[in-house]
Image (tube, helix red, strand yellow):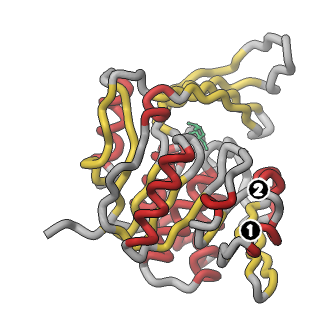
Amino acid sequence: MTERFDVCVVGSANLDLVATVERLPGPGETVSGTGYAEYPGGKGLNQAVAAARGGARTAFVGAVGRDAAGTALLQVMTTDGIATDHVAIVDEPTGRALIGVSSAAENSIIVVPGANATVTAEALPPATVVLAQLEVPVDAVRRAFTAARAMGAVTVLNPAPAASLPDDVLALCDIVVPNEHEVELLGGVDHLLALGVASVVVTLGARGAALHTPEGDTPIAPFAVTPVDTTGAGDTFCGSLCARLAAGDALLTALRYAAAAGALCTTRAGAVPSIPTATEVRELLGS
Ligand code: RIB
């Protein structure tokens, strides 16, 4: 019998090349780095790891290159118990993200898609929640959400990196989780609700988040932490949210868990290594 997953993430996997700097360079400027490290990352992989560490049986649909970085990222998925049957190994190089992180915990990111650009999402394993972002082609997201709807799964879109999207793709989403900039590019909250999106969760960084539904708006309070590196915090929010929704939590309960997980992620360096376990999140929620 085919295994049914709690969460299926359709998305990117990158090797993150991270330089720490006192302050991020402006256009045409060179600054000296204070440190360098390589971490597993990519919005899709980060979200899958967050879902898995949140307790969800998780599958990943994506692509990596036939190279050392691809082998390492597949190993990361396996270590976190993420099913890799739908990860293609392709001739394109594994995706890379060139990341600068300042002493104020701000970042700037250049993504080179590589293998991620080949993701088609032709086949999806059965799942309760299907989560996607925009570091893979929009056609793959459309195909994945069409299949998700056909299997009765909840569809969750994190429209990052920011881009405008055709209405037919937005209309396939049950929940959209943009930041303030991304929601503007999608035409605003009211446009999304008019297309039939049931819930729009706008993430507001250190100010928490705001849930918008046709019934009204609800603030999601932030958790006070001292940030070191915000890379992956939004991804942790999304993956954790889906894990808790698949577990049967009410949306507001799942959002509070997601906010705590996202806050904890900012307290450590790197993307995948900074994603908290359910035990860590429960500790913060209980404090
Ligand atoms: O959202 C953070 C992620 O964006 C990083 O891990 C990097 O790979 C880029 O995709």
Q: Label 1: which residue? A: 192
Name the outermost residue toward the left: 1
Do callouts 1 and 2 mark residues in contact (Cβ within 8 Å)?
Answer: yes
- Residue 220 in view of the camera: no
Which one is in front, 167 or 251? 167
Q: Residue at x 79, y 77 (%)?
A: 219
Three-letter code, disc 1: Leu
Which one is in front, 56 or 143? 143
The kind of secondary structure element at disc 1 is helix
Three-letter code, disc 2: Leu
Q: From what the image shows, is residue 72 above or below residue 145?
A: above
Q: Residue at x 43, y 30 (%)?
A: 115
In the picture provided, is 241 more to the left or to the right than 192?
Answer: left
Residue 196 in percent (x, y) is at: 67, 76
Q: From what the image shows, is residue 47 above or below residue 273?
A: below
Q: Residues within 10 Å of mark 2 (few under 14, many from 20)?
A: some
**Residue 222 falls in which quadrant of the image?**
bottom right
Label located before the other in sequence (1 or 2): 2
Q: Label 2: which residue? A: 186
**Which quadrant of the frame does ligand 1 lie within?**
top right
